Image: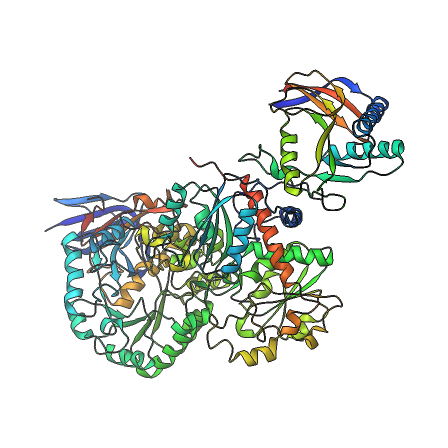
Amino acid sequence: MGTNLKPKKSLLDGKQMERVIRRMANQLVERNRGSKELVLVGIRTRGVPLAELLAADLERLEGHSVPLGILDITLYRDDLSTIAPQPVVRETSFPDGSIDGRVLVLCDDVLYTGRTIRAALDALIDFGRPRAVQLAVLIDRGHRELPIQADVVGRTVATSGDEVIEVRFAATDGDDGVDLLERVEAS
Amino acid sequence: MSKLLVRGGRVVDPSQGLDAVCDVLIEDGEVTRVAEGIRPGRYAEIVDAEGLVVTPGLIDMHVHLREPGQEYKETVETGTRAAAAGGFTAVAPMPNTDPVNDNRPVTEHMIKEATRHGYARVWPIGAVSVGQMGEQLAEIGDMVDAGAVAVTDDGHPVYDAELMRRVLEYSRHYDVAVIQHAEDKDLSGGGVMHEGEWSTKLGLPGWPAAAEEVVVARDLVLLATSGGRYHVAHLSTAGSLDLVRQGKARGLPVTCEVTPHHLLLTDDAVAETGFSTNVKMNPPLRSEADRQALLAGLADGTVDAIASDHAPHHADEKDVEFSVAPFGIVGLETTLSLCLDRLVRPGIIDLSRLIELLSTAPARILKVPGGSLAPGSPGDVTLFHPTKPIRINADRFRSKARNTPFHSWNLRGRAVRTIVGGRAVDPAA
Amino acid sequence: MTESTWTRKDLLGIAQLEPSEIELILDSAQTFLEVARRPIKKVPTLRGKTVVNLFFEPSTRTRSSFEIAEKRLSADSLNFSSSSSALVKGETLIDTALNLQAMAPDLVVIRHGHPGVPQMLAERIEAGVINAGDGAHEHPTQALLDALTIRQHKGRLAGLTVAIIGDIEHSRVVRSNIHLLTKMGATVRVAGPRTMMPAFVERLGVEVAYTLEEAIAGADVVMMLRIQLERQGKKLFPSVREYFQLFGLTRERLKAARRGAIVMHPGPMNRGVEIASDVADGSSSVILEQVANGVAVRMAVLYLLSGMHREAA
């Protein structure tokens, strides 16, 4: 017994994903009148390659590089449960150590309940006092459990609870793409 | 005139080189005939021993009955009841009671209690020194007169070399054995397990083999000039056994006993059981090389006797940190089954040799009646099934104590009943 | 990076651990080091969890290290120590354990003078138990912090030669280190006075040397042990002066080690007894880094174990 994941439909292929991310970069530039002040912070695990792709697009658009940070929110999660092995903790790093006074753009692949972002905000506050924090997500699938909204969204998708969004990045998964999967009972 | 006929069993009596199916007749507490097809005559009680082994009553020459003074651990009543349940018709309690059995009243008390309850005979062993303090000789003559059959300071060694010399000399007046708990306390220090690979791995203070061996070696040197009879209690190392072997070869009056736990378990049990205090004893469980040497000593005759060193402790006392737990385990209700299953069944020794170790030799060393079914011997008989399965269950011990590492062991061979002085004993009564 | 997970309720010793579990703790500890560099050195991970520090032996160092680790993880911690009235003389360990159990802690950190006590406790309470030193048996978090320190300097453990010098017989630090380093593929060489060398020490899988020079020759790591003047009896060595002559680490003697060798000490040090001051304070010394790593290792252990304890009934 258990559940298996079965592909239901493709939401974005590699080409579409590339276009969506480029549009997200454009929106970031518009919102912030450029990208001079920005620091992109990828939330582990798949927020990191998204941040990297956004940074590359921003550099193409604006002609200068955007600093990148990595945030591991494991220690801030509210779902660390008993009688289950703890997830591996990985390092958090920021470009020059401090985030004080910077405009941070939290990047994550999927926005769902909002709890990850809640944890990420808590973590960020412990590292310093950014001037502002924005949120960029590739997919917003709804079902929020906390009052959290993204500033930049690649694509909004209506989903049901037993569906799963799988985001793949070439850097971590071999190819780019987003699929909608469905949980099915395995016998 | 009371008569009891044990009929149809396989009678194994090393004292007369007997191993045959026959009957044993006991009249007025004494064995009168061992033969095939004895007619019971009128008024004889008959014990059917078909399929069972019938032997001279087993004698455990090294037990702690804890009475007087520590009746919460064991009493003469519960200890002898455990003896009967385990196939023993007699036990020799050590003198480390409270007060110490270094005088007539304590010796008499033990015998009186045993007689009153009637489960097994008690042959008290008196102290060598007053209060077992290792200083002044106890009144050995008076204790022997009251019924003591040997002397020892067991629980402690006779540490002072001069005292050992003097007790060997003095004991000759009464022809009693001097039993030594061989332990050099300076060398064993705070040791709680055998000093070896496992004490090193577990970081527990070690009790080295040398601490036993230097005392045995010293005593044998003394024995050569002092005379007397010297017996090593719970001998545990290959080196001590070699010393005893050499002593015997030189004609010294030396004997020794080993315990079932030193024959069956080794020091790695401390790690395997996760520091169980039921594998903590003094002397400690030794290395596999020592164990093999003891087994060889059983077979080649160097080891004279098997004794349990039955050492009951209250559960509260044992359920503590390994380092602070008291030494010792109970053995009266496991010894026979362990020996049958682990010594006789694999062929290390035969049944006759086992009975010599558990009955004939102890009687000879302590110079007490028994150890034989020859006519004129006391009517003390043990009946056991040589191969019937038993699962050791400490919760059903007759002893007050449960401290055994053998709980839940599955063995073959079990005591069925004991007869003391021609009377069948019921340990359940 | 390791991909293994932690599935044990307790950390009783290194002897039971798999190399992958050791690596998981070390990798996690490396991450927790970063927390100590943050302006706010506290994460909410163990919020609402209760950790009891049960110290039957005086220990300022290890206890403080655990306490800091607990606080940085936001756990509620409380201390029972032998000096306080909470551990009443005469109460059995079992009763202490049952009392503890009734308070439903999530984790218990225990230091005790007798080997096996953490295991005894672990079998009786639902909380996860961390051995903070049991007699001369094990001191797993010390070995882990030592390994973390070595790894930071040498980049690996496998293939290194680690010399451990001092009272081998009475040291729990040695036993845990031997288990850990040999499991991870390092060579361990122990040295000390013959009176402080335990029986069958070679069965622990180590090389044995009886001079400092022989022990240090070509070593990548030199770990000096504390000589406990109060603990070692008069029969084990004649005087501190003579000990230093035989086994004291001096700058001159350290030259026999491999270039770039590091010097470690579990603390507290006896300057001039097992180690000369100029070595302790010298460029090879990583002794204070060991202390910093100690907090990170303990955070990692607390974090990993906090997932596995059983819910109190």
Residue B260 relative to residue B371: left or right: right
Q: Is residue B95 left or right of residue C39?
A: left
**Where A87 sits versus C218, above or below?**
above
**Residue B310 x/y as whole percent:** 31, 57
Going 64% across and 54% down the picture, which residue do you hit?
A: C183
Which sits in the foreground, B270 or C78? C78
* Residue B191 image offset from top left, x and y in percent: 43, 66
Q: Position of residue C138 (x, y in %)?
A: 53, 57
Image coloring type: rainbow
Residue depicted at 43% across the width and 57% down the height: C56
Residue projecting furthest to the bottom:
B225
On screen, residue A27 versus residue C18, left or right, reads right
Determine if residue B14 is in view.
yes
Image quarter in which the C terminus of chain B is found: top left
Near-viewer residue (B285 or A103): A103
From what the image shows, is residue C212 above or below residue B155?
below
Task: Give residue A30's position: percent from left, percent from top.
Answer: 82, 26
Q: Can residue C179 be spotted in the picture?
A: no
Q: Nearer the viewer, residue B390 or B368?
A: B390
Residue at 51% x, 63% y is B289
**Quarter residue A29 falls in:** top right
